[in-house]
Image (spheres, grey):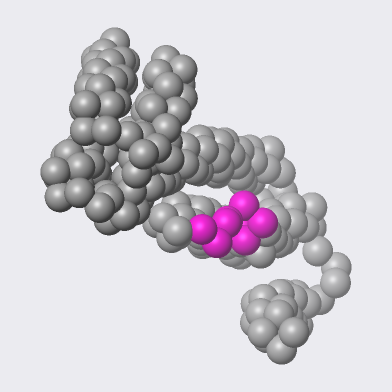
Amino acid sequence: MKKTIFKVLVGLVFLVAFNVLFFLLGGTERTTTEWISYGFIHFAYLCILLTPLFCKNKTGRAVLNASLYLRALIYFFIALIAGIVFIAWNPEEILWPTIIQAVIAATFLIMQLMSVTANEVTDESLARQSKEKVYIQELASNMREAMQSAQEPEARKKLRSVYELLNSASTGSCPEAEEIELQLAADVNALCMNAQSFSLSQIDNSILAIKETLRKRNAIINKSRFA
C-alpha cells in the first residue's frame, strides 16, 4: 500500500510542477495554440503513467518492459520540448502545432501498440517453450526414478540409456509433433510403471519402441524448423 502511494505521489510531481509554472508564468488566459500544447504534454505524460498496464512481471519480460518505458519516455520528452517551443512561440495559426504534435503522438501510439502486440506473441512463445521443456523434463524425471528403483544392474543400465536420451532430447516442439509426443509419453510411462515386473527382453522391446518414437518426434520437429 505504501509503495503504491509513493508511486502515485512521484507520478504527480511533474503534473503539479508543470501546472504551477504554466499558470504562474502565463495566467489562465491562454491562446488555442497554448492549450493544444498543454493538452499534448499531459497526454504524453499520461502515456508514461499508463505504461505499467502493458507490462507483465514475468521472467524474461524485463527487456520487453524496459523498451515500452523507454519509448514512452522518449515520446514524452519530444512532446514536452515541442510543446514548450510552441507555447513560447505562440503562433496564431494552430494548424502546424496541431499537425506536428498529432503526428508525433500517432507515431508513438503505432510503435507502442506494435510492441505490445509483439510482446504478447513473445509471451505465448515463452509459455509454449516452458511447457515443452517441462514435458521432456517430466519424462526424464520419471525414467530416472524407474532407473533408480531397478533391482538388477543390467536393467538399471538399460533404463539409464533411455534416461540419457530423454535428458538430452530437444525441448522444442511443434503442433505437428503433438500426436507422436503423446505416444512417446505413453511408451515412457508404460516402461516406468512396469520396469520392475518386465523381463530384460521386455525392457529391450520397450526401449526400442521409445527410441523409435523419439526418433520420429525429432525428425518431425527438425522438418518443421526448416519448412
Image quadrant assignment for residue 35? bottom right
- Picture coordinates of residue 122 (x, y %)? 46, 40
Q: How many marks on residues?
A: 0
* Residue sticking out furthest to the bottom: 2
On screen, residue 157 above or below 210: below
Tell me if residue 28 comes above or below residue 35 in the rendering: below
Inspect this view and state whether residue 126 appears: no
Residue 44 picture location, percent across and down: 64, 57
For the point 51% across and 58% down, the residue is: 58
Describe residue 206's horizontal placement relative to residue 49 as left or right. Answer: left
Q: Residue at x 21, y 33 (%)?
A: 200
Between 183 and 105, the residue placed more toward the observer is 183
Q: Could you say where residue 71 lies in the image, as x and y percent from the top left? A: 48, 53
Give the residue at the far right of this rendering.
Answer: 29
Q: For the N terminus, give its image quadrant.
A: bottom right
Q: Is residue 52 magenta?
A: yes
Examine the rendering and report whether any part of residue 195 can be seen.
Answer: yes
Tell which of 224 and 38 is nearer to you: 224
Q: Report which quarter residue 199 is drawn in.
A: top left
In the shown orientation, is residue 9 left or right of residue 139? right
Magenta residues (range): 51-58
Q: Is residue 57 magenta?
A: yes
The residue under the point 25% across, 52% down is 151
- Residue at x 17% of width, y 39% of height: 158
User: In which quadrant is the C terminus drawn?
Assistant: top left
Q: Position of residue 221 (x, y in %)?
A: 30, 21
